[in-house]
Amino acid sequence: MPTNAAFASAPLIVFDKVARTYPGPTGPFHALADIDLEIRRGDFVAVVGASGSGKSTLLNLLGGIDRASGGRIVIDGRDLGAASERELTAWRGRHVGIVFQFFQLLPTLTALENVMLPMDFAGIGSPRERRQRALALLERLRVADQADKLPASLSGGQQQRVAVARALANDPPILLADEPTGNLDSRTAEALLDGLSDLVRDGLTLVMVTHEPRAMAHASRAISLADGRIVPEARADA
């Protein structure tokens, strides 16, 4: 039986020779090829690379939104390739939160209702408990005073903070962020990154696709992709 220390040190995310290929008019397109990757609990990982390098594909595979064409993906002991679509949907709702560049809040729901929505879908808690948790998350993200407002009346930074709160609604161990600061001014972006770093210090695992040096400065490690492959990290003694 593994010890608590062994469990704590085991990778949360493992990619083993993972590939993702899509059909194309001139033949198969290899979005990712031969990806070996381990991410541990509490890591803040920045994924960088040029457009078309495979960053979004990697994020989609991590979130169980897409399936690998080859290799094996294991997250928190769950082999995603062995799960049915229904199992994968249920797993994703509990284990992964996703934040997008363009917020994607539902415009007819208040900030509070947007945060409560994932809990409603997953059947977590009573309506009162959902409301209390949503308010606590908005408080933590410093937008509790915007709880009863519609997204259109919020600033970009406020909308992104609400989006982060919504992604954390079901208390997932993993947060995936796709260019979350790309639509924000530098001051607002830095405040958001500080908030995300605080969440990581509390045990969240964060994988962020980004082009911005300020975001990479907050990360504990960076993964560079080029043409669907991980670029080896340069050695300090090279």
Image: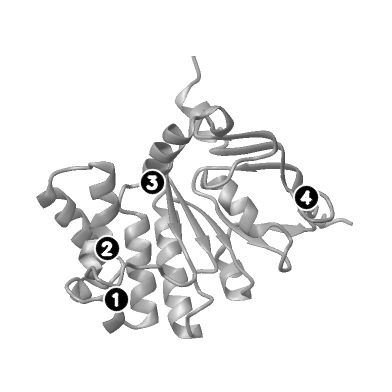
Categorize mark 1 by other alpha carbons within 10 Å: few (<14), some (14-19), many (20+): many
Q: Which mark is residue 151?
A: 1
Q: Mark 4 and mark 2 in contact? Answer it, CB < 8 Å.
A: no
Q: Amino acid at mark 4?
A: His
Give SS at disc 3: loop
Q: Which residue is mark 4?
A: 30
Nearest to the eye among marks 4 and 2: give it: 4
Mark 3 or mark 2: which comes first in sequence? 2
Mark 1 or mark 2: which comes first in sequence? 2
Q: CA distance from mark 1 to mark 2?
A: 9 Å
Q: Which mark is residue 100?
A: none
Mark 3 or mark 1: which comes first in sequence? 1
Residue 8 in picture, x, y percent from top left: 49, 34
Along the line of sight, which residue is nearer the eye, 44 or 174? 174
Give SS at disc 1: helix
Q: Amino acid at mark 2?
A: Asn
Q: Amino acid at mark 3?
A: Pro
Q: Mark 3 and mark 1 in contact? Answer it, CB < 8 Å.
A: no
Q: Which mark is residue 114?
A: 2
Give SS at disc 4: strand
Q: Amino acid at mark 1?
A: Pro
Q: CA distance from mark 1 to mark 4?
A: 38 Å
- Image: 61 above or below 136: above
Q: Which residue is mark 3?
A: 172
Categorize mark 2 by other alpha carbons within 10 Å: few (<14), some (14-19), many (20+): many
